Image (cartoon, grey):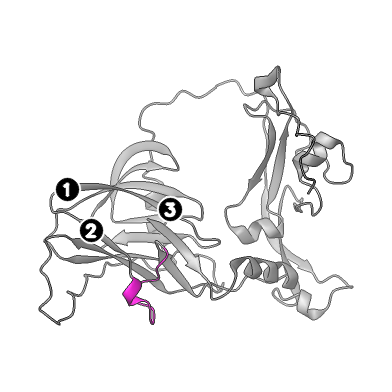
Amino acid sequence: MLQGEWWDANPINVIRQATQTGGAPNISDAYTINGQPGDLYKCSSKGTTIVPIDSGETNLIRVINAGLNQPLFFTIANHKLTVVGADASYVKPFTTNVLMLGPGQTTDVLINGDQPPSRYYIAGRAYQSAQNAPFDNTTTTAILEYKSAPCPAKGGANIKPIMPTLPNYNDTNTVTSFSKSFRSLREVEVPNEIDEDLFFTIGLGLNNCPSNFNANQCQGPNGTRFTSSMNNVSFVLPSNFSILQAHKLGVQGVFTTDFPAKPPVKFDYTGVWIMHCHLDVHIGWGLATVFLVEDGEGLLESIESPPEDLPLC
């Protein structure tokens, strides 16, 4: 089940506008489950996602937060969720009433068709702990519908689904309890000898408005611009070359190799790997860096040279 954010606009333009203005991106107009906002929004109830289930069966559901910027709660009325996996890794199963997923995260859960045959809302809404920060406070719904649920009378309305109880928007205690429930499926051995220690600090802040900017370009709090960094360095994506292309072709001025200060670190896969925050807006503000992994030994540890007819960016 795919949770998402929806704007009555091109979402790429939403991010671009935030970059241009220096302010926070416009909040979404709705949340969605499998592409549909659900019954609680105007003019959307006819497209509400229906999830059928048989009494007595067990279903595996992969819940994905495909939103851009918002962590989201997820719950199903009157049904327990048994978490068995997260982000493509098995976990020690545990039972919960609610999930919380950040953008890009996945959680695999089992649900049992053990309730009286009826219709039950599947619901999601924002988790927002930052004080005074605007956010979309709407609730998206789908419907878990038992195949043996009573049919409506001829010409009558469908049975109204049962609504679950959702946590408060700022319910950090619920989020903490959920996060602390994750355990490895079995004991895991980790390396005891460390080759390199990498220390990262992550910052979110405000820059004063540059003297050559106008007021429309500094719409953060008190005429500032939002910014973010790793180790006090804000990452800027190159505009004309990819970093891998610049590295392979020896193009100067696209990137520097002074972050972190003292590699090398051993990696399994060669290439260019961006490490970034899963909130899209934070990437634009600079909360990212790139690991440039050199070729190893032999063809299997090296990137093939680009073909001669590869179009340039």
Marks 1 and 3 in Cβ contact (< 8 Å): no
Q: Which mark is residue 52?
A: 2
Looking at the image, tell me whether mark 3 or mark 2 is earlier in sequence order: 2
Q: Is residue 259 above or below residue 1?
A: above
In the displayed structure, 294 sits above or below 282; it is above
User: Image check: 94 left or right of 231?
Assistant: left
Residue 151: in magenta span: no
Q: Amino acid at mark 2?
A: Pro
Q: Amino acid at mark 3?
A: Ile
Q: Answer left or right for 236 relative to 12.
A: right
User: Bounds of the magenta span?
Assistant: 35-47
Is 261 located above or below residue 52 in the figure? above
Q: In the visual, does 68 lie left or right of 174? A: right
In front: 278, or 31? Answer: 31
- Comparing 142 with 139, the one in front is 142
| Disc 3: which residue | 64
